[in-house]
Image (spheres, rainbow, N blue to C red):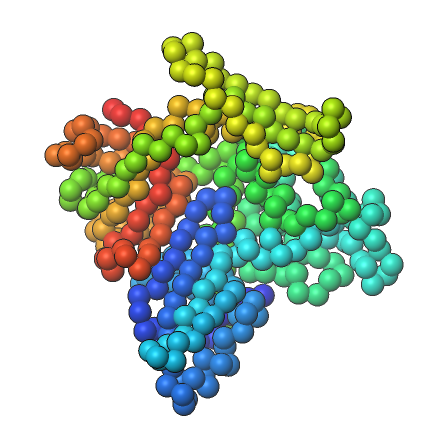
Amino acid sequence: MYDTTTGKVLYDLELAAEPEWSEKINDPGGWKITVPLDGGPRTVRVREWCVRWRFSVAVLRGGQVCQAGPIVAYTPDTSTPTMTLSGKGVWELLNRRLLHNAIYNPAAGGRLTDASADINLTDTLPDIAREIVNHAINMSFLLGSNLPIDLPALDPTQGTNVRNYHGYDMVTFGQRLQELTQVDGGPDVLFRPYLTVTGGARYIRHEMKVGKPYLVQPGVPMLFDYPSNLTDITLSGDGSNDANSAYVKGTGNESGSLYGYASDTSLVSLGWPLMDMVDSGHTSTPVQSTLDSWAVADVALYSNQPEQWQTTVLADTEPRLGSYSSGHYVNYAVKGHLWIKDGIYSWRLIGMSRTSSTPRDRVDHQIQAVRQS
């Protein structure tokens, strides 16, 4: 358990069950733990640190921090007796902060409708992502904005992408950051927690990793063998979200509404039916090019989707958990599966997790975009 704003580790927690956690690119992720109660000293100790948002929990496997972030909810169970706590990754704190310029000062009469509350950026999309977080955690006049996040270095190449974020829109830093990841060519973002020691004290910090646009690893993809260290493959052919054209609703009403549009006719020309989708998640956006960019990204995601796989791998055999990260590419060598043809399949790893149904020595992979060799 650690201090949310400084990252300083305060206690090592005693657990009553295996922890659960999830990590995913462009998503806060989360965690859940269960701690014992006794109605006496243990319970008193839990009361001391079980404070929502003020304190955070880091889930470790050996020296690897799997997930870390603020306590959001807790539920005591008198029949067990235990306490179950759950929380989110550090991104969730950005979802709780209204977006405005770091120099915004309401105590001096500043208003969100003032131009000085706006954030106007012209740069590469990865650097714009960085600056959104920079404004969120380095406010000049509002207490409590600092978070133990390591920002990446700025790219010396000045980009030409323009984003004008207005304070009067009253949306959060987290929402704008996630929207940026969703445009065509938008960067992957992952806050990767780690444990460090400074001045003899332990700290949890979060490295902000930003892709260009993807998070990639040097060298060749990690290799897992089925049914060796790749112990299980669960798959489905769910096409309920398939679409080959996308409309993205923006600002405006009735005939004055803005919208973005994109299509991919490659499958339609081969006999597939026309299938449209409407993305209503960006109705505050007044910029046509941004709406079109979201439409392009929607079509890329939802047209010609492959089978959906979820895999389970051993955590403590090579390649070990901690030697790879969400956003990396992995190869699965499959032999003797009932449904999948023998071969090597390359997937993009978009997330990892451990649930109550995951064996202790294993971790689940969430993956995307298959290619057969």
Q: Residue at x 42, y 9 (%)?
A: 269
Q: Nearer the viewer, residue 219 or 199?
A: 219
Image quadrant of residue 293?
top right
Above or below, 48 against 135 in this view is below
For this orientation, the residue located farthest to the bottom is 40
For this orientation, the residue located farthest to the front is 254
Badge count: 0
Above or below, 31 against 83 in this view is above
Quadrant in the picture for the C terminus? top left
Q: Residue at x 74, y 58 (%)?
A: 140
For this orientation, the residue located farthest to the top is 269
For this orientation, the residue located farthest to the right is 109
Above or below, 201 against 352 in this view is below
Q: Nearer the viewer, residue 178 or 136?
A: 178
Q: Residue at x 52, y 19 (%)?
A: 263
Q: On the rendered structure, is 371 left or right of 350?
A: left
The answer to whether residue 72 of the structure is visible from this angle is yes
The answer to whether residue 196 of the structure is visible from this angle is no
Place of residue 252 in the rendered image (x, y in percent of width and height, measured from the top left): 74, 31
Q: Residue at x 45, y 72 (%)?
A: 75
Place of residue 270 in the rendered image (x, y in percent of width and height, measured from the top left): 38, 10
Q: Nearer the viewer, residue 140 or 88?
A: 88
Place of residue 156 in the rendered image (x, y in percent of width and height, measured from the top left): 61, 35
Image quadrant of residue 128?
top right
Place of residue 360 in the rendered image (x, y in percent of width and height, measured from the top left): 25, 60
Q: On the rendered structure, is 190 left or right of 12?
A: right
Image quadrant of residue 287?
top right
